[in-house]
Amino acid sequence: MMSVQTSQKIAKVALWIAGFSTVAVLIVVIGYVLFEGLLHVNWEFLTAKPKKMGSEGGIFPIIVSTVYFTALTLAIATPAGVGAAIYLTEYTREGKITKIIRFGTEALAGIPSIVFGLFGFAFFVILLEPVTHGWSLLSGALTGATMILPTLVRTSEEAIKTVPLSYREGSLALGATKWQTICKVVLPSALPGIITGVILSIGRVIGETAALMLTLGGSLRMPDSIFDPARTMSMHLYLVALEVGTQPAIDKAFATGTVLIITIFIINSTANWVMKRFISRMS
Amino acid sequence: MKMLTFKKSRPAVLLTIALVAMVAIVGCGGEKAAEKGGEKPAAGTAASGTVKVAGSTSVQPLAEELADAFMDNNPDVTVTVQGGGSSAGVESANTGTAQIGTSSRELKEEEKGYGLTETVVAKDGIAVVVNTANQVSELTMDQVKKIFTGEIKDWSKVGGSKGPITVVVREEGSGTRGAFEEIVLDKDGKLVASAIVQNSTGAVKTAVTKDSNAIGFISLGSVDNTVKAVKVDGVEPSEATVLDGSYKISRPFLFLTKGKINAATKAFIDFVLSEEGQKIVSEQFIKIK
Amino acid sequence: MNDKLKEKAYEKILLVSAFVSVIIIILIGGFIFKEGLPLINKVGLFEFLLGKEWHPTDGVFGIFPMIVGTFAVTFGALILGVPLGVATAIFLAEFAPPRVSRIVRPAVELLAGIPSVVYGLFGMVIVNQILMTIERTYLANILRPEYQRGYSILSASIILAIMILPTVINISEDAIRSVPREFKEASLALGATEWQTIYKVLIPAASSGIIAAVVLGMGRALGETMAVIMVAGNTVAIPDSIFAPVRTLTGNIAIEMGYAAGDHVKALFATGIVLFIIIMALNTLATVVAKRGVGRS
């Protein structure tokens, strides 16, 4: 039997190792992509059109498509997500209805992205073809919106819940209606939390591939409207590395991966910055 | 849990505004495109309208390059190219949701009953590739068949140094696999069940590059010095040998249409088959004549 | 009066948006069943679920190897990922000085944000290569030649373990932090060491949260697609070794959807049904676990 002190020491060392292994894994994965890709990222790569199926030229239309797709997805999902959160926190008590809604939200969060893809393909691309024009930014964004909805509901709900009851009481006592109270008092106070949720959802849609392969249409061109097909950077990375697969294409794929990882790093930092600012203001 | 109470905050509002603005840009993008279409005078060509091309993701990049070149000459025609898979392409042409469906595999029996018009616009040679360290650089068709059906299991049986063969194949349904099976295997021949299955040229290539005992088949356009394409029955796979028919393993890229087609669609297909169009084809794939 | 009407209208709108998730879940279920069920009826439920052969272009549809494959890589990922994840969570909650956690936490977030395609590429090029070398150098005489190719349950499990780390770490850390301070103080005051306090007091008290983390991590591993198809080898065969290549249910759909036609497409939707049911069952399990945790504390 080990002495208590020895096991304490061993455990402590093991836990430090665990913590550092996690960081090490990150460094290895990211280091690998940056090592292979950083040299191929330059101004031309960011601003030029792709040529020869993406194995030459740049990724400008793909960057623009990624921004359009992300914005459209958020524009569709955010109102529904925040609306649901307001309803859950301000209009109901825990009961049968909230149970059903919560189950729905949680179930949705667990659905694999390829199943969202199958659904988006059957529903948005095929059935709603007259509206969405088949594989298009719109079909992709609708599919993406269903995927991030649970995150948005959950983070918004948490943010709204932290608004002190006294704010609402004050507002209601001054004669404001419930809706006015929500719009003018509750939402502004909860906004940073909601925005953090939105920013985190951006990370999810930017990294998505499986569902978009079946819905977004994969075009290398600059989309003219939401009815045009497009591809995001993640899709481009996959398609260039695997569908084309020549050495120059793989270099471009890693360069795309580098841009993608830097983008995600910026998104995460922004989310943290927003959170921190609000926490520090509050205290 | 996290506390997030405080009053109005400017950055947050700004972010929201930025978001709304981005959405507005997307919305406006559509209008601008519409204006562009309306303003530009016709540059002396007859056709006008929209052609929607949908289907194979392998054909998509090629179709887009062709469409771009075509639209330079025909500014009144808009050609959109969507990728969703060969079968979706066949369905789109059949149901009329797209003017042209694209497929990178031959039509299946049931699809042949749809009454679609098939136009071969390009060919893609399929090369049998091995690791660059492999001593084997030539195989007979029969050896290729026996390797992929699992009858030959070791490289020493076909003149290589000893080592169990790693067979890498494409997924079932794929045009590349379909063509390979049809041309290389007998009717009742089945690819060996223990083979590694990958669903893209690049993934097959990576497997072959990393494993000195591996063999796979990939699109000829993707062969480079990271893998070695073997001669089959003494014929080296190349554009010339596929064109003259001496290299047997290739698959067609199809444009599928149904019934009478409109002027814009016809103009586009004519362009693709023209010398100019076929020149674009030959940059990555093999032209039809 | 008018105001009241408006208030009612707003409430109704909000109610509708609250039900969007529920509606979508029903739509997803509805569409997948509509597209896939006819095939299951045609093939027969048992033949479909327990059939060992998958030759979709010849009309043979059995997904049993994929079901086994899915659970094999998922459990592999849990075995590798949960201990490391929980240990990192304990480290962050109890040991890490602020300066260190300021590095580890963003690292975990970034790990969560990396697209699965990137993990897939990493696994395909680096992990599989290393595994293949090990298999051919040290295990060459023990393993069958088909199991010496890198592509395997093991490589898929390693990549998935990395991918579920953030989920496991975040939720376990929350659970450990939410254990009341008094528990810990009382234990330390009684003369227990920090480690004794952690494994005799903190971990048991946080166990339902940690289990929830494991269940959610399992959900993520079950559902992951792109990374797995790039490393697992996708062979349709019931694996009998962790070095065997496998195909998962998600992989089956993603690999073949692009070219599938007719019944083959329906069979892929039917694969989606099986996946949908497994995930729903897992969700129900998670809800039950969470409820039990609340009931106890």
Image (spheres, coloured by chain):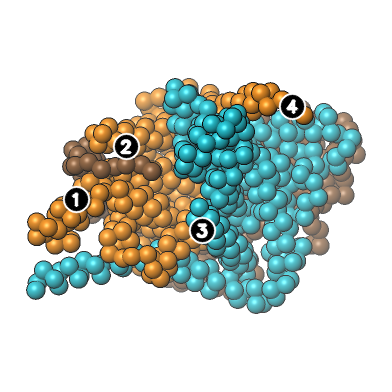
Chain colours: A orange, B brown, C cyan
Residue type pointed to by label 1: Tyr
User: With C7 as the anchor, is B194 left or right in this view?
Assistant: right
Residue at image coords 39%, 35%: A268
Camera-side mark, 1 or 4: 4
Q: Residue C63: x and y, percent?
A: 70, 62
Residue type pointed to by label 4: Met
Marks 1 and 4 sit apart, C-alpha to C-alpha, by: 56 Å
Residue at image coords 41%, 58%: A146
Which disc is residue A167 wearing?
1
Check disc 4 and report its element: helix, strand or loop.
Answer: loop
Q: Residue A190: x and y, percent?
A: 26, 47
Q: Is residue B28 above or below residue C49?
A: above
Residue ID for mark 4: A2
Residue ID for mark 2: A275
Marks 3 and 2 sit apart, C-alpha to C-alpha, by: 32 Å
Quarter of the figure with the N terminus of chain C:
bottom left
Residue ID for mark 3: C295
Is A102 in front, or is B250?
Answer: A102
Is A83 in front, or is B166?
Answer: A83
Residue at image coords 51%, 40%: C183
